[in-house]
């Protein structure tokens, strides 16, 4: 009854089922999603009464999911009579297999409670966060014979799935395959190839990213292009007696993360050592979250976005956090950027979201001329804003003429600032 349709060679290992992790990445037009949809439909006839979880990082509704694709493939493969397709999900009437569709970050607890998850398909896996991945893996791998299939077009080398499976030695029990347009078993129209050839001629970097599945490269509009480095974990050791600085950017909605930063300065070098980054963070959980992720915070003052004085008051009075709002004003973003650019910046690789923002944070580009403007795009800036807040008082004090201050007074002032958790001269 059930026949396996149009299976390319690179999909055969999935049907053989000898691995736990299946990583299919590459450029546009590879047919990854169609082939995985067919695979899951066929697999739903081979097991009974289990759940197939189809997910992505963010999903506001079913229209954001692969529900429509699976429905159309079921119809195209001639299996419609065996499935019940509703707005809530898809059910294989013959085996009791349930296809569930959800976003990961906003449904952590509900996913943990789903029994018998056998197959997981993460579409657009380049967008998945480390927190979601760390939650999902133990939840799924507790079930015998489970499989996790990730399909994505790479974005950045620091994305958790790319970094874990492609950018370094992958975990055991993994099948990893790059899939390009030339590997697609489905027919594609001439328009696809015309646009691909045009992109190749006009912007070769875009061609490599879109069609050849290469990670994005930094453009000239990138604010910190060539101005930051990744700390080598093997050789790095934090000096003793450094004075850490802490900054906090509040999340204004579930889509906007709360971001905290720990950093320190040594000579002309700025070291970013820890980040605290989470979407949907409740105010009542914020203080504990920051303390758990930013070492030493309880001994110092954290400087936060002053646009939320009610949040600052709560963290200060209820959670007993040492916190102050920064003095924001006209030009504070540009001044903060210039101040950051005065350092050689080093970022610890555990600060995944910070690294991502340093690669994406960009100036606006004039749509007509292509000229790079002075104004900065208001996105990819949560960790960077927290960093600016952490160092704001250092920047304001940078231009002071300390030669006019008597040495004994300067020493006493240094000690006062150190004791109060503020910057030293």
Image (cartoon, rainbow, N blue to C red):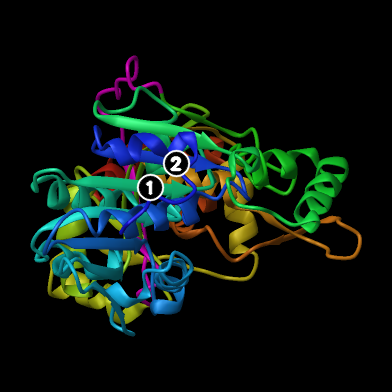
Where's residue 283, x and y in %?
22, 74
Where's residue 361, x and y in %?
59, 52
Q: Which residues are magenta?
A: 232-258
Contact flag, marks 1 and 2 (Cβ < 8 Å): yes
Nearest to the observer: residue 81 or residue 32:
81
The residue lying at 57 percent from left, 53 percent from top is 336
Q: Which residue is mark 1?
A: 150
- Outermost residue toward the top? 235
- 270 relative position to 293: left or right: right
Q: Is residue 239 magenta?
A: yes
Mark 1 closeness class: few <14, some 14–19, many ≥20 residues within 10 Å: many
Height in image: 82 above or below 401?
below
- Outermost residue toward the bottom? 87
Q: Which residue is mark 2?
A: 24
Where's residue 288, x and y in %?
14, 59
What is the secondary structure assignment of the residue under circle 2? Answer: strand
- 268 relative position to 292: left or right: right
């Amino acid at each position: 009854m059930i026949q396996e349709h149009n299976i390319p060679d690179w999909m055969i290992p999935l049907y053989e089922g000898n691995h736990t992790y299946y990583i299919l990445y590459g450029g546009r037009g590879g047919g990854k999603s169609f082939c995985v949809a067919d695979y899951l439909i066929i697999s739903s006839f081979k097991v009974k009464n289990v759940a197939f979880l189809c997910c992505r990082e963010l999903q506001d509704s079913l229209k954001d999911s692969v529900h429509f694709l699976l429905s159309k493939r079921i119809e195209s493969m001639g299996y419609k009579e065996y499935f019940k397709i509703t707005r809530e999900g898809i059910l294989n009437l013959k085996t009791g297999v349930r296809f569930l569709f959800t976003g990961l970050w906003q449904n952590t607890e509900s996913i943990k409670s789903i029994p018998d998850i056998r197959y997981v398909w993460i579409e657009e896996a380049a967008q998945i966060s480390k927190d979601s991945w760390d939650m999902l893996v133990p939840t799924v791998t507790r079930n015998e014979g489970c499989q996790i299939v990730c399909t994505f077009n790479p974005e950045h080398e620091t994305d958790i799935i790319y970094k874990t499976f492609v950018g370094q030695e992958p975990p055991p029990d993994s099948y990893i395959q790059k899939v390009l347009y030339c590997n697609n078993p489905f027919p594609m129209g001439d328009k696809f190839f015309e646009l691909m050839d045009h992109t190749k001629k006009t912007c070769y970097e875009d061609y490599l990213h879109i069609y050849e599945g290469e990670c994005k490269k930094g453009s000239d509009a990138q604010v910190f292009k060539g101005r930051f480095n990744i700390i080598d974990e093997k050789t790095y050791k934090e000096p003793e007696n450094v004075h850490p600085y802490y900054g906090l950017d509040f999340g204004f909605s579930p889509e906007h993360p709360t971001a905290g930063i720990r950093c320190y300065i040594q000579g002309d070098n700025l070291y970013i050592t820890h980040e605290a980054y989470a979407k949907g963070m409740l105010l009542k959980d914020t203080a504990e979250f920051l303390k758990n992720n930013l070492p030493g915070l309880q001994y110092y003052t954290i400087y936060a976005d002053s646009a939320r004085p009610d949040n600052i008051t709560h963290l200060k009075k209820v959670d007993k956090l040492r916190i102050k709002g920064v003095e924001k004003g006209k030009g504070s973003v540009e001044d903060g950027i210039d101040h950051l650019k005065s350092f050689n910046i080093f970022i610890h690789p555990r600060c995944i979201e910070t690294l991502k923002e340093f690669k994406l944070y960009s100036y606006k580009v004039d749509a007509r001329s292509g000229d790079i403007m002075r104004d900065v795009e208001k996105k990819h800036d949560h960790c960077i804003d927290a960093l600016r807040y952490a160092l704001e008082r250092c920047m304001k004090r940078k231009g002071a003429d300390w030669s006019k201050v008597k040495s004994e007074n300067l020493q006493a002032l240094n000690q006062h600032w150190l004791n109060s958790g503020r910057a030293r001269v």
